[in-house]
Amino acid sequence: MKSFFEIKSQKFDEFSDQDPKPPYKQSWYEINSKATMATFLELFDSDSEFNPNEINEDSTVLLEAILTERLEWVEFLVRKGADVNLGHGGYPLEFAADMASRMVSKEIYDYLEPLTNIEIKHSIFISFTVNHEHKPLQTLIDSSIDVDSPREDGNGRTPLIIAVQQGDDKMAKIFLQAGANPNLKDELSGTTPLISAVKGQYLHLTRLLLENGADVTIPDANGDTALEIALNLQGKKKLRIKKIIDLLIKAGATQN
């Protein structure tokens, strides 16, 4: 049985030896790309026996195929038994979503999306959220992923709560436009997006959430509402906190 990465390494060395002297010398990326393409051509044309789930330090054969932007090679590997849910070095759908968001080989994303487990999709969704990856997130949302379903491991934060706590107005708008519930709590402290916005003293996010149906009466696990938390913050950034308090009261908040 042939090893994809051994063949690729051999071809990389061959292309490196053939590399011209400066100023026309190729970059490592160019040589690596040529070696990858040549390896797939050899395996594809000869239909050789190889392990479609072979891994090296930070990649898999399927990830290598995705990066070539050749759908037929991705399909070839899946037919050979490549695991689309294998997350070594990143998930296949994660790479494909990033490429599709840049208008590159969207057909690969469309092929892999229905084959990928929902738990993996949720994990990718949370990862993109934490890393402020707006465009790949939109690609996942356009595939009808429920923006309230993914939950962060350990604390159960929703994507909207993560976006608010990071002060990411743009991402919060994306989630709300996609139908995110502004009143869902995390699973650890019972915080809501609105409470998170108040704690972070994010005036614009507080206004955005109130405009999209955030409930000012919902308390956290300690029984504190957004207004009560805001009142305890009055010693810091007084003008901004006053504006946040005014917004909450205007939306119907009252102090117990």
Image (tube, grey):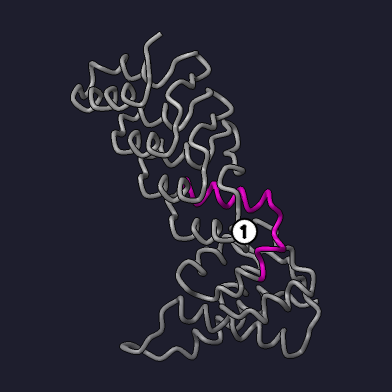
Establish if 82 lies above or below 121: below
The image position of residue 205, as x and y in percent, is 34, 37
Identity of the residue furthest to the left in this view? 239
Which residue corresponds to mark 1? 91
- Residue 32 is a magenta residue: no
- Asked if 220 appears above or below 17 in the picture, the reply is above
Q: Quadrant of residue 157?
A: top right
Q: On the rendered structure, is 72 left or right of 194? A: right
Which stretch is magenta?
A: 111-130
Disc 1 on helix, strand or loop?
Answer: loop
**Residue 116 in magenta stretch:** yes
**Residue type (three-letter) at the residue carrying disc 1:** Tyr
In this orientation, which residue lies closer to the viewer: 48 or 7?
48
**The N terminus - image quarter:** bottom right
**Label 1 crowd bin: few (<14), some (14–19), many (20+), radius 10 Å:** many
Question: How would you classify the magenta stretch by its main secondary structure?
Answer: helix
**Is 207 on the left-hand or right-hand side of 215?**
left
Give the residue at x 52% y 78%: 32
The residue depicted at 50 percent of the width and 14 percent of the height is: 222
Q: Residue 109 location, x and y as percent? A: 60, 68
Residue 87 position (above or below residue 198) = below
- Which quadrant of the rendered structure holds the C terminus? top left
